Amino acid sequence: MTTATAFEVRTLTPHPSLEYWSVCKIEALFETPFLDLVYRAAQVHREHFNPKAIQLSTLMSIKTGGCPEDCGYCPQSARYHTGVEKQQLLDVEEIVAKAKIAKARGAGRFCMGAAWRGPKPKDIEKVTAIIKAVKELGLETCGTFGLLQDGMAEDLKEAGLDYYNHNLDTAPEHYGNVIGTRQFDDRINTLGKVRKAGLKVCCGGIIGMNETRKERAGLIASLANLDPQPESVPINQLVKVEGTPLADAAELDWTEFVRTIAVARITMPKSYVRLSAGRQGMSEEMQAMCFMAGANSIFYGDKLLVTGNPEEDGDQLLMAKLDLEPETEENRYRAE
């Protein structure tokens, strides 16, 4: 299995991987009785985080549609007819206006996504101006812009970017069933450039793309064996969009998704585990189980790039019901 053990910089985060996680070992975790697994994950969570604090991020698409990639889950691919209209990179002023709203509503991090295979140098010039403007608002910044060329990560870091999102999507052995226009190692190479530049890593995957449990374990193993481990791990449930190859993917039982959250928490104890795409279709009870199993971050806002997300009022009500609160510097860690 390919991992990012060749990263040149290994001291950028306080939580390098403590052990090597084999796929077989992670499969055994998945097979743990459900409530025992959730209980174990909850214990691990409480060792490192305040279980009442939820990190809130807002995600905005700053360049939509027209992507040349063939990712089988993505409505922004130019290869599929999904009703998503191509939109050029937005102006700085429009993005900053949205960032101000996000901050006023409680988000601590503003994430920006652009539908590129990878940015060109001229794109980086525009994106760095956007990052600087958002950073001046006092928000953490995160970008997901695709595969990076040499030197681009350093430019983004200098502009004030805090996190770079680059998901592995799925296990190495299942990758070719989902994506054909890039390789798994392409993702690993960009993550190496991101780490070398001193950026924090946001890296996760998508569950429910007709993968087997062993392949779900392979995804978690690939993430957990990154050294250092990602600071943020978004776990997405596939949003099936008409017109994409995975529109008819088999339904994933809700308990399997919760198991994945729990296994991610156990194997990556100091990473933020984020409930990402697909949350709009989750019941309050399922989300509560995910929080119990160690999820401690959500996307907050009514849209994720081009798919829906729970309304902010609904999130506030759910957090109140569960006695959860937005994460701040003061409440971030477990009380001694």
Image: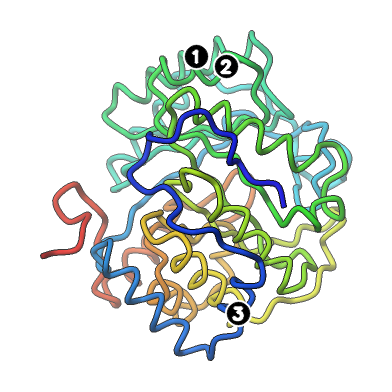
Which residue is farthest left?
336
Sequence-wise first label, 3 or 1: 3
In the picture of the structure, the residue carrying the numbered disc 3 is: 28
Given the image, on which type of amino acid does mark 2 rest? Met
Task: For mark 1, give the secondary structure.
Answer: helix
Q: In which quarter of the image is residue 7?
A: top right
Left or right of 298 in this view: 1:
right
Say which mark, if any, is on residue 100: none
| Residue 155: % across, % down | 49, 14
Q: Which colour scheme is used?
A: rainbow
Residue found at x 74% / y 76%: 251
| Residue appearing at x 81%, y 37% in the figure | 182
Q: Position of residue 128 (x, y in %)?
A: 48, 15
Residue at horizontal 74 percent and vertical 62 percent from the top: 240
> Up-down: is 4 above or below 18?
above
Q: Which of 311 and 30 is in front in this view?
A: 30
Picture mark count: 3
Query: Are dots 2 and 3 in contact, CB under 8 Å?
Result: no
Q: Position of residue 107 (x, y in %)?
A: 33, 45
**Which residue bears the numbered disc 2?**
152
Marks 1 and 2, how far apart in space? Answer: 5 Å
Answer yes or no: do the residues labelled 1 and 2 have beta carbons within 8 Å? yes
Q: Name the mark nearer the viewer: 3 or 1.
A: 3
Label 3 Cα crowd, 10 Å radius (few <14 / some 14-19 / many 20+): few
Amino acid, disc 1: Asp
Mark 1 highlights which residue? 155
Q: Nearer the viewer, residue 181 or 7?
A: 7
C-alpha separation, residue under disc 2 versus residue under disc 3: 40 Å
